Image (cartoon, grey):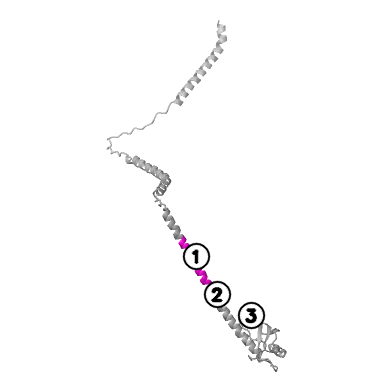
Amino acid sequence: MSATLRYRDPYRFSAGMLAMVVHIAFFAMLVMGVRWQTHQPDRFSVELWDNLPMQQPTEEPAQQPAEAPVQEIVAAKKVVEQQASSSNVPQKADIELRDKKLRKPIKPQPSAKELRQKQLRQKQLREEQRVMEAYVEKQRLAERERVRAEVLAATSAEMGRYQDMIRSKIRHNIVMPPDVLPTAAAEFQVTLLPDGSVLDAVLRKSSGNAAYDEATERAIYKAQPLPIPSDPVLKKRFRELRLTIRPEDR
């Protein structure tokens, strides 16, 4: 038995050491776990005074005026009212426009008698206007005819004056043959250039005296340039002239 105990002694020592290590480790884990979960105690210091200090009156913090929440509520209410009023502006404008249309006075419809009188007045006015326009047009046409007649008269008088000047100049250049009757009259168609030169002279009606006709034709060419007016309108009328030359007017 002693041999058996001696045989087991080494194992018993090692087992005891192992158990001791395990217990130590377990104890250390417990201690560490407790330290991790606990807080450090608050530290404070103590001062010792010989005499008690005079207590200073403490100032209470200023309290917020009780009106602040009321002011905020009033401001929020004003914002809401402004938004509501701004959203109602189009509706108010539509309502005012509709009210104006409803309040607009309705014109009374004219009666049948008034319509007939109005139509008669309009017809009378149209008739008066038509008469006035016809009178104005008649006066305008009369004035135009008067001016035209005055122009024609002036033109005819001016042409007659220049024709008399041309005939007089031709007569002064006729070498009168013998035995020419005072009533003899030779009619020529004379074509003139713008400067009064004679382009052509054609006998249209004989005087019955060939010598007088030839003498008159020679006098026409001899008297050029013939006097013609300077006015361009009248000058065109002197391109072709029918001249009757009589000896008694010499």
Q: Is residue 238 left or right of residue 51?
A: right
Mark 2 to mark 3 CA distance (whole Å): 21 Å
> What residue do we see at 51% from left, 18% from top?
22
What kind of residue is marked 3? Arg
* Mark 1 lies on residue: 130
> Could you tell me which secondary element the residue under label 2 belongs to?
helix
Residue 243, above or below 38: below
Label the magenta part by its dominant secondary structure. helix
Q: Quick one: label 1 or label 2, which is nearer the N terminus? A: 1
- Asked if residue 8 can be seen in this view, the reply is yes
Q: Residue 105 carries which label?
A: none
Q: Position of residue 123 (x, y in %)?
A: 47, 60
Q: Quick one: label 2 or label 3, which is nearer the N terminus? A: 2
Q: Where is residue 151 in the image (x, y as percent from the top left)?
A: 57, 78
Q: Nearer the viewer, residue 23 or 104?
A: 104
- Asked if residue 195 can be seen in this view, the reply is no
Mark 1 to mark 2 CA distance (whole Å): 22 Å
Pick out the residue farthest to the bottom.
178
Mark 2, Cα crowd under 10 Å, few <14 / some 14-19 / many 20+, is: few
Q: Give the range drawn in magenta.
A: 123-145
Q: Which of 73 and 250 is in front in this view?
A: 250
Q: Which of 191 and 33 is in front in this view?
A: 191
What kind of residue is marked 2? Glu
Q: Position of residue 245 (x, y in %)?
A: 66, 87
> Could you tell me which secondary element the residue under label 3 belongs to?
helix
What kind of residue is marked 1? Arg
Q: Residue 237 carries which label?
A: 3
Q: Quadrant of residue 119?
A: bottom left
Mark 3, Cα crowd under 10 Å, few <14 / some 14-19 / many 20+, is: few
Q: Quick one: label 3 or label 1, which is nearer the N terminus? A: 1
Pick out the residue farthest to the top.
1
* Mark 2 lies on residue: 145
